[in-house]
Image (cartoon, grey):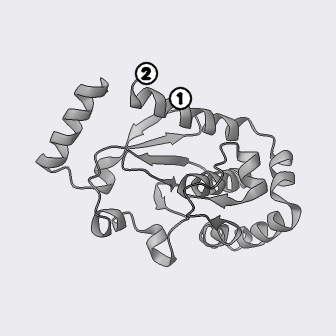
């Protein structure tokens, strides 16, 4: 199995779990009080809801910390790294019927969302949370591929929306294609 097949299968399963989840069970896992606070934020608009979501998630930088894959476990524990935090935010936005939603994985090991066509990284602070140019400007990472998974099961390459497709980037992508039969 190549990396793309693994990625599609792994994240596809996570997306399917959210899509097939019963909202009542998700609310129960999240907790009524948290759901109520998020509902109040959403009454003010999508942006207030997206600003509120990170308040209920604890970043855990410990590499040995337990990692949660199930949305129900993530809702119950509300802690982890960027993957769990993006999964948490995706689940919350799903609860409020926000569409379209896409879960983005970069092959440089980071995860975020695209919400109604706009960048949203719940793990970032302030306006950086909404700045799609932040990674290219501030991270010392050689980005090549960024794949977005929507709730319908579609996958698309969104790298060109985040980074300049320079000859160097295209060469890295070509090597990945050849190695992984993309």
Numbered-mark total: 2
- SS type, badge 1: helix
Quadrant where the image shows the N terminus:
top left
Residue 78 x %, y %: 71, 60
Q: Who's the residue at 15% across and 51% down the image?
A: 166
Extreme-left residue of the structure: 167
Residue 19 x %, y %: 68, 38
Extreme-front residue of the structure: 64
Residue 9 is tagged as 1
Residue 59: quarter of image: bottom right
Q: Who's the residue at 47% across and 34% down the image?
A: 7
Q: Is residue 116 rendered to the left or right of residue 51?
A: left
108 shown above or below 135: above
Q: Earlier in the sequence, mark 2 or mark 1?
A: 2
Residue 135 is tagged as none
- Using the numbered discs, state the Cα–Cα distance from disc 2 to disc 1 in whole angstroms: 10 Å
Neighbor class of circle 2 (other Cα within 10 Å; few <14, some 14-19, many 20+) is few
Q: Who's the residue at 21% across and 55% down the image?
A: 164
**Marks 2 and 1 in Cβ contact (< 8 Å):** yes
Q: Is residue 73 rendered to the left or right of residue 104?
A: right
Q: Who's the residue at 50% across and 62% down the image?
A: 121
Residue 175: quarter of image: top left
- Residue position marked by numbered label 2 in the rendering: 1
């Amino acid at each position: 199995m190549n990396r793309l097949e693994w990625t599609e299968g792994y994240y596809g399963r996570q997306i399917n779990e959210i899509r097939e989840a019963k909202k009542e069970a998700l609310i129960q896992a999240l907790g009524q009080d948290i759901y109520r606070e998020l509902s109040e934020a959403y009454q003010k608009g999508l942006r207030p809801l997206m600003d509120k979501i990170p308040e209920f998630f604890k970043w855990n930088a410990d590499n040995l910390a337990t990692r949660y894959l199930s949305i129900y476990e993530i809702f119950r524990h509300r802690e982890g790294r960027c993957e769990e935090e993006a999964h948490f935010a995706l689940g919350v936005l799903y609860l409020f019927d926000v569409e379209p939603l896409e879960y983005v994985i970069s092959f440089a090991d980071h995860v975020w969302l695209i919400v109604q066509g706009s960048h949203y990284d719940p793990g970032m602070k302030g306006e950086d949370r909404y700045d799609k140019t932040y990674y290219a400007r501030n991270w010392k990472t050689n980005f090549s591929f960024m794949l977005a998974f929507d709730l319908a099961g579609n996958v698309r390459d969104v790298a060109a929306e985040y980074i300049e497709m320079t000859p160097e980037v295209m060469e890295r992508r070509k090597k990945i294609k050849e190695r992984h039969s993309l």
